[in-house]
């Protein structure tokens, strides 16, 4: 089976993890984190070209910490797409605020700024654009709307490390950007995350929030939690940062092979970059038309030992916990039509060609 995702790990990660064990330095509650946390933060900062990068222990923790730092809480509303992993909404609920689901743009599956505008109320405090599948959101429209209506923008860049919008890294447009290093992501630590920002005050707050609101020992000043990234995970993340360029190149190569082989194929639309939006190719997601059966194609691909997967059906607003009155036609359309295929660095050129051939046959 070619899995939909697989971490790309080598001897370098093993050596760094062993060094952590040899040093008996598993974790530290120091305000600035351990040595490897700081190394990882420094390379992420340089890669993204931002002022602060603060490591935390998951993408969900990154979102929750960012919302807390933005002052989002009870009585507030936060705009976000329903077409996302449920963690985006869960982080909002964890702060006491109410998630308000916004529809998506069919062309790239990301939040529709025009629909977001319609859903702003007096209670709206923040907006979470999600760069789903590594497809950058329309950050010009989102930034303009946020500025006009004084909303905080917290980018969910959990799937988009390395994607760019107008040649700038996703995660660096909003007040804060949130990344995940879960095992499926383009850069992994098993579990892990980071909040990035150019704002000194927000960075200080995040540092407190990830460590029980403390500054110098037991002097809790704001509500915080234990969101610290352990050194063992930071060791892996730090080494993965050195290979990020190489890993992204491999994804791009695989996607290119597939797009060339699938060009002109009937029954589904291919993922396409634009002059403004460059993908990290976290996933290769096609959208089926009315004439082709997505679920049958998924079954056929899986029979061919290809880990084709559907993200996300049901969308968040149709899950039992979140079920409500939201009407989101483009979201419902996407949930029924998308199918994601593997393009991770473990997929070789021959396998990329095999995936394309299998999809063509399955949709034909
Ligand atoms: C869009 C999105 N948001 C948030 C998360 C949460 O990240 P984590 O699993 O690291 O908590 C993920 C990944 O799992 C994600 O894909």
Image: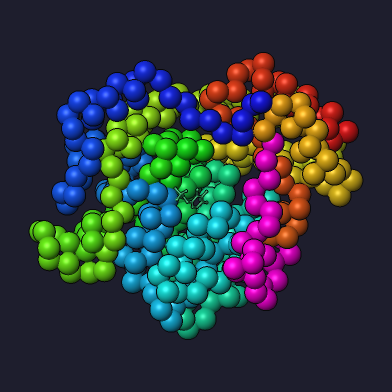
Q: Position of residue 138 (x, y in %)?
A: 55, 55
The residue segment tinted magenta is 308-330
Give the main secondary structure of the magenta stretch: loop
Q: Position of residue 337 (x, y in %)?
A: 76, 49
Tell me which residue sits at (43%, 24%) in the image: 9
Q: Position of residue 215 (x, y in %)?
A: 14, 60
Q: Is residue 94 left or right of residue 270?
A: left
Q: Is residue 62 left or right of residue 159?
A: left
Q: Is residue 264 visible?
A: no
- Seen in the picture, residue 229 relative to 316 is either above or below; the reply is above
Tell me which residue sits at (66%, 26%) in the image: 1
Q: Is residue 31 left or right of residue 145?
A: left
How many numbered marks have been drawn onto this rendered protein structure? 0
- Seen in the picture, residue 99 relative to 265 is either above or below; the reply is below
Q: Where is the C terminus found, in terms of image quarters?
A: top right
Tell me which residue sits at (64%, 48%) in the image: 311
Assess whether residue 40 is covered by the magenta stretch: no
Tell me which residue sits at (61%, 42%) in the image: 274
Assess whether residue 324 is covered by the magenta stretch: yes
The quarter holding residue 213 reads: bottom left
Pick the front one: 32 or 190: 190
Query: Tell me, what colour scheme is on the image?
Result: rainbow
Pick the front one: 227 or 149: 227
- Seen in the picture, residue 278 relative to 320 is either above or below; the reply is above
The quarter holding residue 303 reads: top right
- Seen in the picture, residue 158 relative to 24 is either above or below; the reply is below
Q: Is residue 122 visible?
A: yes
């Amino acid at each position: 089976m070619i899995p939909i995702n697989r971490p790309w790990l080598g001897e370098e990660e093993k050596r760094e993890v062993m060094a952590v064990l040899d040093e008996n330095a598993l974790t530290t509650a120091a305000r600035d984190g351990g040595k490897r946390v700081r190394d990882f933060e420094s390379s992420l900062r340089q890669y993204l070209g931002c002022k602060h990068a603060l490591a935390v222990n998951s993408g969900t923790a990154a979102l929750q910490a960012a919302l807390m730092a933005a002052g989002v809480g009870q009585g507030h509303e936060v705009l976000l797409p329903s077409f996302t992993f449920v963690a985006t909404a869960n982080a909002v609920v964890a702060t006491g605020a109410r998630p308000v689901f916004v529809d998506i743009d069919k062309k790239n599956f990301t939040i529709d700024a025009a629909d977001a505008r319609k859903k702003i109320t007096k209670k709206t405090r923040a907006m979470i654009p999600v760069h789903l599948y590594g497809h950058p959101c329309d950050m010009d429209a989102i930034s303009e709307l946020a500025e006009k209506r004084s909303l905080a923008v917290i980018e969910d860049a959990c799937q988009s490390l390395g994607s760019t919008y107008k040649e700038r890294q996703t995660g660096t447009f909003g007040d804060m950007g949130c990344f995940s290093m879960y095992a499926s992501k383009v850069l992994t630590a098993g579990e892990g995350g980071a909040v990035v920002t150019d704002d000194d005050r927000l960075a200080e707050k995040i540092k407190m929030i990830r460590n029980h609101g403390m500054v110098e020992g037991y002097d809790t000043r704001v509500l915080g939690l234990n969101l610290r990234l352990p050194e063992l995970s930071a060791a892996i993340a730090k080494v993965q940062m050195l290979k990020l360029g190489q890993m992204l190149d491999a994804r791009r190569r695989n996607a290119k092979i597939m797009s060339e082989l699938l060009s002109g194929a009937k029954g589904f639309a291919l993922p396409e970059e634009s002059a403004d939006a460059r993908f990290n190719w976290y996933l290769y997601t096609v959208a089926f038309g009315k004439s082709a059966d997505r679920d049958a194609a998924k079954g056929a691909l899986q029979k061919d030992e290809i880990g084709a997967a559907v993200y996300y059906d049901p969308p968040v607003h149709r899950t039992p916990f979140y079920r409500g009155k939201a009407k989101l036609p483009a979201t419902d359309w996407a949930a029924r039509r998308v199918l994601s295929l593997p393009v991770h660095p473990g997929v070789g050129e021959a396998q990329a060609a095999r995936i394309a051939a299998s999809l063509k046959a399955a949709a034909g």
